[in-house]
């Protein structure tokens, strides 16, 4: 059994009682000192410092009541218990006046005595802890930066720290006993007698008033608090008026910045649409002419026109990608594609220019490289176009090597050239937006200074890394990694068109083209007819709705900007029909604007995917092939 954690001074003049009682008590209390008289007890008390005095009442020389009087005068916190066989009323009245805490009548019942000692011990310990806690509280509160106020249940202030004086302007003397409404006159309490609200220590924003009448915003927390055995509330007040002012300034600055960003994006979106729309016609027409068996003397002109159109498109794309990355970020596709064919297509695209410059362009694969992977082929194309294009641009003689390796699901791509190289101090800055290794580079070689920065960002956003090693006059090696999921299946082998580009078979696929621009109608239909699609044309949304309800199509190519009924509303109406065919038919948006808000609107209108104009024919071909096959899988 645990001992009672008290220090007990036991006073009894009868040896026959004192010795056995002291021995019994020693087995139940932490510390005990026996005394044979009041005089001996007074000598021990200052050394022993007891918690409880247990004394007989009738003793020679000094009675138990006189002993208690003298002990209370020296140490008022000592609790006292009287042991006596005396039962006269006068004795009890005198004992109460002296301040005796408890009585025990001889002969003492052992269980009653120990339960009394335990009760008084608990009260003593609680008082001691409360006193220590209050001392600590006052010490800590005096050093706190926030105002700390204690009120009783009538809302009268009983404690006021230094920070409260500084924040509110009232001294401790001025606030002692004043009502809390002095500080919070606008706060509505439930009733006048109610304590302040207690809401689990969560901060409440209030309007407060200083001594000089100034109003300010503060945050206050209300918690139950017990001091000097009186219940009340502890209130911690923080002046947040300066923070509120700064927050308001930040909100205004953020709104201004967002307005500026929206204005910039609207401008770029309009410019994107205006530039891409004629480019779609130019590049599309060039592609068609190249595949229509031109004369040998016309091929060079068409190739030059195609190259210039693609260069202009690349600049527009760089600027738009920079704006998207800067504003809202880029979303990535996750579709299956043939990695070897993609890389080989890149080399074929640059082989014409490399051959003109007399540069070798070689490709090497890891022997165990997986053929079919899942990722974003368009973005991988963009990265390789930037890196291989730079290698061809900055190499006047020698060789360019492209290598592809694999380690589990991590693929490594390396583009090495024997070009002009990059100075060591410029190796980091070349990945910054609008930065090139030398001021003369733009004038001599062209470019926006965006390609490498965008490539690095695209790689990083997909969980990969891009690095470079270079030596001036010797060449550069760009290496990047990308995580791509692998597959054991092999993709269908596409055909090859007249320009050497790989095209998937789309025989008999029924496509509805919704487009108001006649040139774009003609370009899209020419390509679709060449791939043996069954093509129908709608010049606006209303025509599209009529056709799609009365005919069955496999896919819809939807322009967004059209008079009368635009592509967004047309798509919403298609999806609203109570028909599984209309709810699931792939709708691919064709748009000259490439901003995130456009993609959000496209998906919100129920469209399946988005393709930017001017579209690359093989990309459109792959999109159609992908969604037609996806639909076939779903129906199988």
Image (cartoon, rainbow, N blue to C red):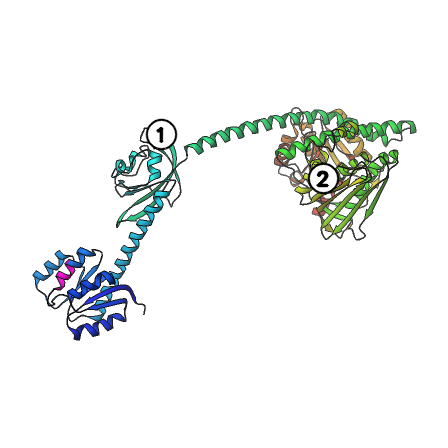
Instruction: Please name whichever residue, 30 or 384, is drawn nearer the observer in this view of the structure.
Output: 30
Residue at horizontal 69 percent and vertical 42 percent from the top: 459
The image shows residue 495, relative to residue 308, as above or below, that is: below
Q: Does the magenta stretch include residue 63?
A: yes
The image shows residue 365, relative to residue 397, as above or below, that is: below
* Mark 1 vs mark 2, CA separation in Å: 57 Å
The image shows residue 44, relative to residue 292, as above or below, that is: below
Quarter in which the N terminus is drawn:
bottom left
**One can see residue 509 in this view:** no
Compared across the picture, whether 472 is left or right of 571 comes to: right
Q: Is residue 83 magenta?
A: no
Residue 441, percent across and down? Answer: 76, 30
Name the disc covering residue 166, or none.
none
Residue 479, percent across and down? Answer: 75, 44
Secondary structure under tag 1 reads: strand
Residue to which mark 2 is pinned: 379
**One can see residue 217 in this view:** yes
Which segment is the magenta one? 58-69
Compared across the picture, whether 348 is left or right of 39 comes to: right
Reading the chain from its start, which is encountered first: label 1 or label 2?
Answer: 1
Name the disc covering residue 215, or none.
1
Residue 51, percent across and down? Answer: 24, 61
Instruction: Please name whichever residue, 632 or 366, is drawn nearer the observer in this view of the structure.
Output: 366
Compared across the picture, whether 143 is left or right of 375 comes to: left
User: In this view, which residue lies farthest toward the right?
Assistant: 296
């Amino acid at each position: 059994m645990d001992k009672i954690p008290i220090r007990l001074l036991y006073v009894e003049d009868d040896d026959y009682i004192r010795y056995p009682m002291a021995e019994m008590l020693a087995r139940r209390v932490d510390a005990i000192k026996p005394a044979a008289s009041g005089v001996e007890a007074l000598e021990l008390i200052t050394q022993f410092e007891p918690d409880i005095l247990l004394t007989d009442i009738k003793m020679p020389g000094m009675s138990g009541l006189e002993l208690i009087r003298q002990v209370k005068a020296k140490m008022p916190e000592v609790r006292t218990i009287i042991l006596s066989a005396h039962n006269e009323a006068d004795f009890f009245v005198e004992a109460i006046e002296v301040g005796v805490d408890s009585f025990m009548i001889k002969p003492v019942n052992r269980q009653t005595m120990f339960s009394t000692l335990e009760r008084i011990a608990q009260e003593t310990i609680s008082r001691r802890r409360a006193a220590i806690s209050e001392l600590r509280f006052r010490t800590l509160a005096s050093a706190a930066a926030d105002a700390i106020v204690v009120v009783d249940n009538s809302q009268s202030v009983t404690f006021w720290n230094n920070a409260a004086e500084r924040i509110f302007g009232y001294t401790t003397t001025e606030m002692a006993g004043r009502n809390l409404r002095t500080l919070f006159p606008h706060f509505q309490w439930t009733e006048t007698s109610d304590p302040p609200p207690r809401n689990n220590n969560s901060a409440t924003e209030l309007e407060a008033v200083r001594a000089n009448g100034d109003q300010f915003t503060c945050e206050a927390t209300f918690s139950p608090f017990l001091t000097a055995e009186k219940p009340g509330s502890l209130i911690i007040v923080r002046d947040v008026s300066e923070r509120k002012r700064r927050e308001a300034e930040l909100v205004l600055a953020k709104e201004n910045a967002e307005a500026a960003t929206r204005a910039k994006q609207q401008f770029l979106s309009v410019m994107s649409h205006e530039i891409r729309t004629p480019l779609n016609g130019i590049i599309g027409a060039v592609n068609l002419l190249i595949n229509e068996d031109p004369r040998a003397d016309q091929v060079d002109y068409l190739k030059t026109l195609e190259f210039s159109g693609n260069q202009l498109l690349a600049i527009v794309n760089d600027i738009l990608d920079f704006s998207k990355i800067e504003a809202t970020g880029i979303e990535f596709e996750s579709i299956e594609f043939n990695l070897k064919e993609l890389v080989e297509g890149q080399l074929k695209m640059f082989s014409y220019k490399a051959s003109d410059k007399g540069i070798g362009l070689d490709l090497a694969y890891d022997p165990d490289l997986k053929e079919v992977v899942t990722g974003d082929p368009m973005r991988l194309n963009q990265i390789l176009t930037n890196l291989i294009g730079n290698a061809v641009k900055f190499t006047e003689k020698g060789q360019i090597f492209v290598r592809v390796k694999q380690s589990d699901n991590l693929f490594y791509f390396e583009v090495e050239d024997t070009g002009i190289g990059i100075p060591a101090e410029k190796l980091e800055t070349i990945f910054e937006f609008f930065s090139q290794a030398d001021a003369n580079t733009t004038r001599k070689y062209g470019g926006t200074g965006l390609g490498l920065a965008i490539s690095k960002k695209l790689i990083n956003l997909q969980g990969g890394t891009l690095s470079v090693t270079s030596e001036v006059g010797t060449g550069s090696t760009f290496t990047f990694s990308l995580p791509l999921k692998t597959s054991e299946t092999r993709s269908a082998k596409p055909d090859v068109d007249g320009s050497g580009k790989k095209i998937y078979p789309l025989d008999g696929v029924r496509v509805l083209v919704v487009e108001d621009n006649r040139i774009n109608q003609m370009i899209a239909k020419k390509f679709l007819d060449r791939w043996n699609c069954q093509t129908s044309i709608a010049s606006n949304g209303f025509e599209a709705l009529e056709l799609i309800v009365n005919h069955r199509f496999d896919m819809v190519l939807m322009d967004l900007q059209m008079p009368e009924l635009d592509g967004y509303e047309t798509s919403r109406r298609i999806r609203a029909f109570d028909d599984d065919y209309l709810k699931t038919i792939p709708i691919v948006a064709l748009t000259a604007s490439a901003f995130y808000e456009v993609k959000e609107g496209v998906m919100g209108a129920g469209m399946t995917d988005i393709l930017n104009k001017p579209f690359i024919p093989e990309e459109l071909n792959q999109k159609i092939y992908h969604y037609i096959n996806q639909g076939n899988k779903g129906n199988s």
